[in-house]
Image (spheres, rainbow, N blue to C red):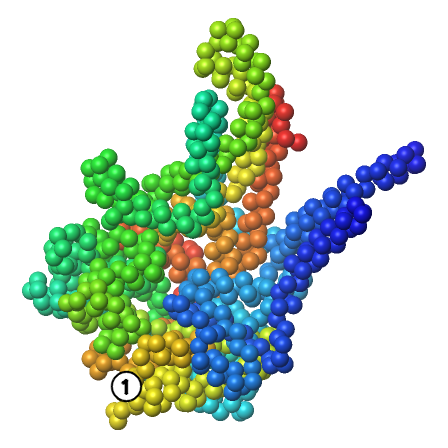
Amino acid sequence: MRYTRRKRLDRSKYLYVLLAAPVLYFLMFRYAPMFGLVIAFKDYNVFLGMIESEWVGLENFHDIFTSPDFWQVFRNTLIISLYKIVAGFPVPIVLALLMNEMRSVKFRRLTQTVLYLPYFISWTVIGTIILVIFSPTTGFMSQVSVWLTGGSRLNLLASRQYFRGILVITDIWKTAGWGTIIYLAALSTIDPQLYEAAIVDGANRWQQIWRITIPSIMGVIVLLLIMRIGWIMYAGFEQILVLQNPVVRDVSDIFDTYVYRVGLGRGQYSFTATAELFKSVTGLILIFGADRFAKVMGEEGLL
Amino acid sequence: MRRIALLMVLLLSSTLVFAAGQGEGAGEATTEDRPVIRVLSGGWFGTDYNEVETTAILEERFGVDLEITTTGWGNEYRQRQQIIMASGDYPEIMTIDSNATEIEYATSGALLPLNEHFDDYPDLANYIPSEQWDVMRFPDGNIYTVPTTSALADGTPISQTRVQTYRSDWLEEMGFDVPETTEEYFDVAVAFSQDDPDGNGEDDTYALGGQDGAIQFFVGIMGAFGAGRNIWVEQDGEIVNLALQPGAKDALKFLNRLWDAGAIDPEFITDNNDRWRQKWLGGVHGAPYVFGHLADENNYDGYREQFKANVPGGEWVIGPPLVAPGYEDVAHAGEKLSTRGWMRASILAAAENAEAALPILDFMASEEGRLQYTYGEAGTDYEINDDGSVTVLADEERKAEYGINLYHVPIIRPASFAHMSAYYQDRLKEWEAERLTQAIDSILIDEVGEYNQILEDYVEDEFVKMIIGETPIDGGYERFVEEFNRRGGEELRQALNDAN
């Protein structure tokens, strides 16, 4: 028994060596920084350092839960994330299905490239483009708002009514194309015999999609949805940081922007570390919840 | 062979990880033995202070290596500052631009008490009169920061250079006098934005604009009502906040009227500093509350030259502080900037070469250092006239190369307006006389650090929403006052009055 284990170990030693680098990475950059969370229970002072700072127990949690900003930030994070999931999650699926049906390979490749492109543009650049498009004096979108409403030109970026919508639409525009990759990969694994059999049975294109394509990639869809829900507390830091302005701050301030502004701008590290901790725990609960839900619904789940 | 290759990969990856952790410390050693003095400060458009001649002169004179890092000002600067402080890799010299930050750092023991070294550095000790050092002094008796000072040619101290300005060519063409009341301002503002003053047939001009939705661009108008931003001032022996003054609601209503009339550039919320600047230079705004020196004939930072190139017939005039009907008896020019200096130089006690930074501050505080940094070399770059005014001889190229910035010195900023036109100096004096002194300046209590930044952010956000009508002012202003007090406004007011 002992002999075989050693033999097995010996046989796969290179695999363990390969494994060492990622394990080291996770230990150093993912697990070690977690000790920083102690500042959520301290009155952290940058000059005293993490060890010397005074312990305050749950005082930071009390401050957070009684702060008027906190619940607003919590609500915004959930709402913006949910909008993005509801409106944005199906888009890459639909795009992938459409591309899958394309007959011309050349045209399909071209479409794919064009759709991927926005993913590689940084939010800073997109932010500038959006400022121009939405400019209340010269922008195209404000002209559209005049045509639609017949009113005067609006600064849509400074409108609490439209701002979240702009966040969702620009997010879809940037990420939807890239999101199709996994679905396209899943689509390519479907056995063509299924389609051939369906055609023999007289199924039309629509029926083929509905009866074969979608059920075949359902597992992938559920998997991605669970992972997406795990990210629900991350509602798009860079995007909001770039597009936010004082008028829409109360409808768009999410955990990440709040922590960035208050933690760094005002130097309240303990307060914001507490908010981050809350955010992470909530995210964890949500991902377990989504996984359990998927299993109840008869899908494979993640864990 | 395969084994060796694998070993190499492993070794390489582990060194990489190690190097990533060590990189910062290793890069700091210099080939020579000169101590490195790192400077962190806010900066100005595109100047790299490491490249200019004045920096090389300082390095030579004191046998040090200067590493000057500059960022923008305001929140951007403070965020950078906090990240650097949290990293524990302290610069020797650091600019501080808020009382809250100063209180936090000073009470944590992070700053070097400068007064303990005054005997060795007389120029630093004599930089400002002892009464003003007393304003800088903390309750523990120590002085931790050196304030920026600014003065006119005759020595009058000046804190704030924002004034109400007007396009005089537009006023003349449209038959207006320079406005003195808010009602007169309203008529001018509407005409400037609606009646096509630049005559290009397009609706592309406004009375005033701004950047990032900041309220400071409206202080000239709020001042007419005796109100303002989140600024604490002393009135009749009591410390009160300008945002809560009786005139504040009327001021917001007036601004909202201007907004509805289309007189305020709707992009003031989303424009950044650069876009705002391009608009000013392009003649888009005709009656803004801005730095008066932008249009001064001495061509500050090339502003006037660029403006003239874009708008050949454009001329500017500085108006008096506006007065709103019913608010004749209040001070109308808003607040002075802090008498503790809107930026201050400090030395971090824990920095590696903290003591080596003292002679540099001492030199920059001396008459010689101040003149050199503000104007360059005597005789070739500037001349001092008999009345104390200064004539600048250096051209733009020389200024850039040498590092003559006229005001923008990243270490200590002894700004002088002695080279500005007599007209500008007179107007500035007129405004300064009506400005209110900030009460917080002489009261350095912990509550300031705890609440003031929160309140400032809150006032900025809520006022913008009321100005553009996102929040109705009736009812909305009252809710704002309630929430302001709930967020610490009332506690801070009481603490300030108790400590006063």
| Circle count | 1
Res B258 visible: no
Q: Residue furthest bottom?
A: B386
Instruction: Specify whether B381 is left or right of A82.
Output: left
> Which of the two residues, B6 or B367, is positioned nearer the viewer here?
B6
Spot occupied by residue B449 in the image (x, y as percentages of width and height): 48, 66
* Picture quadrant of residue B279: bottom left
Task: State whether residue B408 is above or below residue B246.
Answer: below
Measuring 53% from the left and 74% from the top, which residue is drawn there? B67
- Where residue B201 sits: x, y (%)? 12, 52
From what the image shows, is residue B10 above or below residue B343? above
Q: Is residue A111 left or right of residue B166?
A: right
Q: Position of residue A210 (x, y in %)?
A: 49, 16
For the residue pair B422 and B61, the one nearer the viewer reads as: B61
Residue type highlighted by circle 1: Thr
Q: Residue at x 54, y 39 (%)?
A: A231
Q: Chain of mark 1?
A: B
Q: Identify the residue under disc 1.
A: B391
Helix, strand or loop at label 1? It is: strand
